[in-house]
Amino acid sequence: MALLPAAVAVVLFAAGAQGFAVGGGWDAVRWAVTACAVVVLLVAAAVAITVVRAKPAVSPTVPLSEKAAPDLYRLVRDLAERLDVPAPSAIALTPDCDSWLEDRTHPAADRAAKEAARRDPGAPADGPGRRRPQAAPVLVIGSPFLWWMRVAELRAVLAPVVAGTGPSAHPDIAAARRFVRGLDGAVADAAAPARGPVGKVLRLPHAFVGRIARLLLRSCHSHATEMERGVAAAASTRAQAVDYGLRIVAQEQVGLAYAGWDRLLTRVALPAWRMGRWPSQLDAGVVSALTELSRRDRLADGFTSRLGERPACDLLEEPGAADEAASLLAARLFHGGPAETGPDWAPVDWQQYPEEVVDRKWRTEAARLHQVLDTMGVPPTSATGGGDVADAGVPTLARVVEYLGAGNGSGEELAAGISAAVARDEARTQLRSPQPVPGGAGGDVLDLWGPDPLPLFPLQPPRTGTELLADHVAAMVCCAAVDTAGAAPGLDWLDGPALLVDGERRADLGSPVLSLVEDGDAGPLRSWLASVGVRTDKPVRLV
């Protein structure tokens, strides 16, 4: 389409040279078409240059050097040699249950490869029928796999992934992928917000290029999909000869690891992130969570026997450091926390989790609940802790139960107040958190976030007012149980914060709390409190 006006101009000039299409305004038509052709060619060249120079999206990962994991690099190279494919150029970790190959070549890397090929006489040179070799892609490995899987299982899982380096070295496939990534990068650049006066001036040209790139990307989508399906099928076929029997067992571990990782993030890590703490050993927590799942689920009885074999994390020189970096990246991806630790964003060990996360979470939510009641003008109740008149107005569970048990829509009003208070607290937290800088240094983490808002992959949708109110009432009940009945905060690897009574977890609090919040029925909760020995009239310590 870009060459069509130029072709028409050539035809018109050729016709004029041969004595056709002369006079009668044909000269004006020829020069008008020529001017249009020049403009179209210039625009096409600008679009092509933008697509070529566009930086495609790079997955946020934790780089893993060969010095940090020599045994893992050796395993991957041996696997590539068995598959007769090029070895990956590097290895990186992702805080997710997935593994893939990612091409991170750029013009500077291409120039370096060309220079290396020039210095090496035995390397294939550019020329007719010759194309310079492409740099091998980076192997990205899901960090939960390293801690849960055994070495043999990890090798079986990585076999079809590493086999994909063969098609990646094919010049036609590599060129097609570069083209698609360039279009994707151009679309992303056009969608990015304008920054500064220069960015505002270039906004219109970027938008035009983005529309052209989006049209081309939509046109080649089906072809790229079919190509990737063929590449995946070829890689899977090539990998069938490597540990075929073990791959079936390893795939079962992939599904189990994903289930445990999801519950660990949503029920264990997310409450900590909301409290300004990030668990620094998430991958080690996966092992505890899946071991607990194996204990509870009869379908997983055979999985605990695997734990005697060598875990794949032994292939790392410092598993704790890699786990900590992946845990911080997980917090950024799924919650949007800062890139570095600070006063309001500190790591927490699993041993400290009950005290620094669970107990603090309960008391913070209980304090917010009483603050909203104060704002609404709900009269406080009197505590009977010491019998002194200074005891009037201290926070007690009786105040909450009596207010919600009165009915008359009191729960809806309190839920609205809680939602507004939570929104204000979250807004203040975001203002205190430093914003990510594109291309900035975030430790060993590849910090290429660009203008994308954080979190990139939120774990849960926004909570409703009723859900928030139920959480706050349950937190108040747990505080009262700890302060008046000798209970203790605890950690359940599959369900997160837990209330321990006589060393045993009480998981039956949710239903009585919902009856009070949704129906205004305080009977079930009063019965539960009586069974535990909680005094509702005793004062509760808040944050």
Image: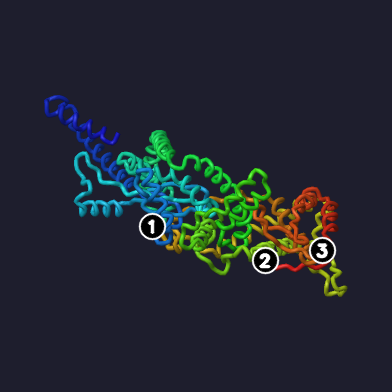
Whether residue 221 is visible to the viewer of this picture, yes or no, is no
Q: Position of residue 268 (x, y in %)?
A: 63, 56
Q: Residue furthest left?
A: 18
For label 1, count other residues whose C-alpha is less than 10 Å away and answer few (under 14), some (14-19) or many (20+). few
Q: Amino acid at mark 2?
A: Glu
Residue that carries the numbered disc 2 in the rendered image: 355
Residue that carries the numbered disc 1 in the rendered image: 197
Closer to us: mark 3 or mark 2? 2
- How is colour applied across the structure in the image? rainbow
Residue that carries the numbered disc 3 in the rendered image: 379
For label 2, count other residues whose C-alpha is less than 10 Å away and answer few (under 14), some (14-19) or many (20+). some
Q: Position of residue 343 (x, y in %)?
A: 57, 69
Q: Is residue 328 or residue 211 the one in the foreground?
A: 328
First in sequence: mark 3 vs mark 2: 2
Q: CA distance from mark 1 to mark 2?
A: 50 Å
First in sequence: mark 3 vs mark 1: 1
